Image (tube, rainbow, N blue to C red):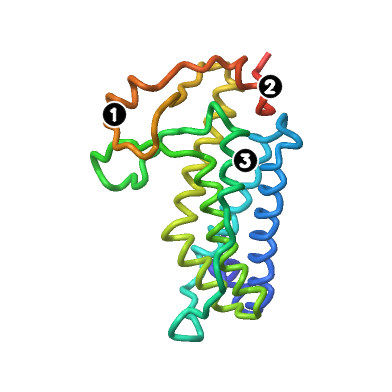
Amino acid sequence: MSDATLHAHALDPDSFAVQIADSIESFIVATTEVAKGDEPDSAVPFLLLEVSQLLLAGGRLGAHEDFVPEERYEPDTGPDMDVDDLRERFAALLDPVDVFSEVFDPYEPRRAPVPCRISDSLADIVMDLRHGLAHYRAGRTTEALWWWQFSYFSNWGPTASATLRALQSLVSHVRLDQPLEALDGLDTDEDVADEALAEEAGRVMLQEIAAPLGLRSRK
């Protein structure tokens, strides 16, 4: 992509803001619907699609020059909306494949993988995005873009990337008829070494998770 194409939106920043806001709001609405559990057969593929699309918006924010807030201090958006219900719904929907292993910084050597939960990640992403959306809906467009860009680098971007890898791996294991390693019984609050991760990882047969999560193995 040329520099002219990459920065064409600079001529119309409002259009860029609208596109980013629409992508973010679409992700929030879509994932909230998935969490209701009305269509569990399509949950994982749908989440894979939604997180992928969200990261496209994140990539656009990341490629943009830094947004500078108009005010020195961030205006108060009021209390953040509670995401515990969303977190719990996803945990129930994605059991027993909620826990996955992740290395947060691929450029930091010799860091042990840590256990994470897809449910926690999705809820945290939604909370970050809602915070910026509150600024956007209040007419503070630059503040919203600054927050979404800053939190893309610092929190929701890495979290979404890790979640995407977990969802993509889950789909791949099923489609390629490969046994899936799951961290059954692993407490994500504990500091667990590599050996312990391997010991506590249980074998989950594909036929036990494919149908309930909307996945189909290759014939």
Residue 194: mark: 1
Q: Which residue is mark 3?
A: 89
Location of residue 139 by image quarter: bottom right
The vertical placement of 78 against 169, above or below, is: below
Q: Nearer the viewer, mark 2 or mark 3?
A: 3
- Name the amino acid, label 2: Ala
Counting residues from the start of the chain, the first of labels 1 and 3 encountered is 3
- For the C terminus, give its image quadrant: top right
The vertical placement of 204 against 142, above or below, is: above
How far separated are the C-alphas under marks 1 and 3?
29 Å
How far separated are the C-alphas under marks 2 and 1?
30 Å
Please state the horizontal and vertical placement of residue 26, each as a whole percent of the image: 70, 56
| Classed neighbour count for the residue bearing mark 2: other residues with Cα under 10 Å, few (<14), some (14–19), many (≥20) | some
Q: Which sits in the foreground, 203 or 54?
A: 203
- Name the amino acid, label 3: Arg
Residue at 40 percent of width and 29 percent of height: 186
Q: Which sits in the foreground, 120 or 2?
A: 120
- Name the amino acid, label 1: Asp
Residue at 49 percent of width and 76 percent of height: 67
| Classed neighbour count for the residue bearing mark 1: other residues with Cα under 10 Å, few (<14), some (14–19), many (≥20) | few
Please state the horizontal and vertical placement of residue 79, each as a whole percent of the image: 55, 68
The vertical placement of 48 against 182, above or below, is: below
Q: Which residue is mark 2?
A: 211
| Classed neighbour count for the residue bearing mark 3: other residues with Cα under 10 Å, few (<14), some (14–19), many (≥20) | some
Counting residues from the start of the chain, the first of labels 2 and 1 encountered is 1
Q: In screen coordinates, is 215 left or right of 95?
A: right
Please state the horizontal and vertical placement of residue 129, each as a whole percent of the image: 57, 61
Counting residues from the start of the chain, the first of labels 2 and 3 encountered is 3
